Image (cartoon, coloured by chain):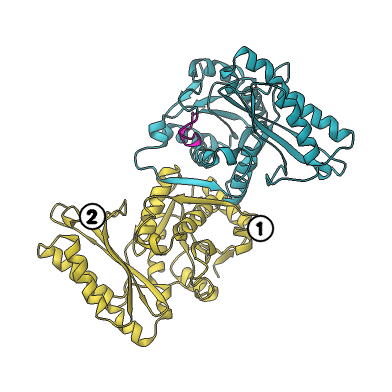
Chain colours: A yellow, B cyan
């Protein structure tokens, strides 16, 4: 059975030992409830490094008080089996009380890139993400950390943080993994009722439509967004949070995708707030 | 002549090499304009580690727009000679444009401990300090970093940050070094006119008075602060920013020093805002 480390000191000791032996360490930070998307990142990490650590920590600081921290699915037994099969070497699953002991007071925040998209409706979310990722980097001290393209704003924010704070780690991004009907894999898909699940296919359909529009020469963001919005708005269970086309690094809106752009969206279906995105390549790219 | 490294990548390379050879690295972060106080920290670092890096960087993010960033004294030639004599192995003196390149967006902030004292009159100061110290730790990756007791709130904030973010570094604190008449060494003492300089001795005199009061059984903070204030207020050039007695770790006011307390003060003399402090040990400690 794969080693599950819960102690911060033990994890640091293991990592430092591996590092001092010249072994390349890979980290895949997760909140557990693993699906094929996460496991594809574990495989990616295994190809790039020698010792893969998967962290499982439902991080309270990235949830607002009204969000689904308590409801978020947890099943470390299942997760451990999946992680082992995917080829990781160790699980780091710290306790909340050790990650944020009484008196905790420090936060890492990336400005500007976190103002829009998910940062707009979840104003403290990214601060929680960058804080816990900094902690994980300091504990596991990986050479490479792998994040998923589904969380496009998240990895842009983390890349900015790593660059700005001179963190000695390489950030690698794995592609979105989808269900056969196109829905992006997400731990939150488990919240969906059958009818909501049926309607969520509109998300991927709308992203494909955007790609077709660009291929046919329509590159104005306003035009594309209006048509994407129409596809999703047809679904009576869908409540659109945002649909935007932004610069993939800076997360600022772009008017035209001829120079490229990231179409990103967040849509509620019942209790599930789902995000998805597609990189649009215009004529210039 | 001592090696002066300006490149972030070169500094990281040197540190990683030393580390991989099992050499203990010490870091003394400074803004240059070195005096005996800084040099005592260098000597301290030399006693605890094998390879001592002194960083010299006048960090813009810890100065507010109305503060003395431009006026702050700079003389790397002098500094280099002093550092070499003090027994350090290398100077890290990065460029501002490399530390904060265009598009920079990330800050590390410690809450609560930074609300009072210097954080009250300099609200963005500690965010700048914790951000640059994080960067220096990530670049130099020291085993031990040495700070001065003169900046008592600063080292409390940095210790909190290191603990909260699981940074793998030990924070060591060296005592205040004073001029023969008791004035704490500070690069900002160079701003003082002769008359202002003469009046600054009231600071140390007031701290000694506080110690005497405690020895004689007066332990109420209000009482002590009133008497300290009277000593300083006698000087016509003195403009008191704050005089407080706080918990040395949490930086929250304490009413009575029987359980110990840190008497900290900040006082303007002309263009120089000077800080000083003393640890008061009451009956219980």
Residue at the location (60% across, 42% down)?
Answer: B158
Q: Is residue A66 above or below residue A144?
A: below
Q: Is residue A248 left or right of residue B100?
A: left
Q: Callout 2: residue from which chain? A: A
Residue A145 picture location, percent across and down: 43, 55
Residue B259 visible to an observer of this rendering: yes
Residue at the location (17% across, 53% down)?
Answer: A285
Is residue B65 highlighted in magenta?
Answer: yes
Q: Which residue is mark 2?
A: A254
Q: Which residue is mark 1?
A: A102
| Label 2, residues with CA under 10 Å away: few <14, some 14-19, many ≥20 | many
* Res. B157 image quadrant: top right
Q: Which residues are magenta?
A: B57-67
Residue B273 picture location, percent across and down: 59, 27
User: Which part of the image, by quadrant, shows the N terminus of chain A?
Assistant: bottom right
Residue A259 picture location, percent across and down: 18, 52
Dot 1 and dot 2 residues touching (CB under 8 Å): no
Residue A95 visible to an observer of this rendering: no
Q: Nearer the viewer, residue A208 or A173?
A: A208
C-alpha distance separating marks 1 and 2: 43 Å
Residue A165 picture location, percent across and down: 45, 43
* Res. A247 image quadrant: bottom left
Q: Callout 1: residue from which chain? A: A
Which tag, 1 or 2, sits closer to the chain's start?
1
């Amino acid at each position: 059975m794969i080693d599950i480390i819960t102690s911060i000191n033990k994890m640091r000791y293991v990592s430092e030992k591996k590092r001092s032996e010249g072994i390349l360490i890979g980290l895949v930070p997760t909140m557990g409830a693993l699906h094929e998307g996460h496991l594809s990142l574990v495989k990616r990490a295994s190809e790039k490094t020698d010792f893969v650590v998967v962290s499982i920590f439902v991080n309270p600081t990235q949830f607002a008080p009204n969000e689904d921290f308590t409801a978020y699915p947890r099943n470390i037994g299942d997760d451990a089996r999946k992680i082992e099969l995917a080829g990781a070497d160790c699980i780091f699953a710290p306790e909340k009380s050790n990650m944020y002991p009484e008196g905790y007071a420090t936060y890492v925040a990336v400005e500007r890139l976190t103002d829009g998209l998910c940062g707009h409706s979840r104003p403290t979310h990214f601060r929680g993400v960058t804080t816990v990722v900094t902690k994980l980097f300091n504990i596991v001290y990986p050479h490479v950390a792998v994040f998923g393209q589904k969380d496009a704003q998240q990895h842009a924010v983390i890349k900015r943080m790593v660059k700005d704070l001179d963190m000695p780690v390489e950030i690698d991004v794995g592609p979105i993994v989808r269900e056969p009907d196109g829905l992006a894999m997400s731990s939150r898909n488990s919240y969906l009722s059958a009818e909501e699940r049926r309607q969520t296919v509109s998300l991927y359909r709308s992203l494909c439509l955007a790609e077709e529009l660009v291929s046919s020469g329509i590159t104005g963001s306003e035009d594309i967004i209006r048509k994407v919005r129409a596809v999703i708005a047809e679904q009576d269970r869908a409540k659109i949070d945002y649909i935007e086309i932004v610069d993939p690094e800076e997360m600022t809106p772009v008017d035209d995708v001829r120079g490229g752009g990231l179409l990103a969206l967040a849509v509620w279906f019942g209790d599930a707030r789902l995000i998805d995105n597609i990189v649009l390549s215009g004529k210039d790219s």
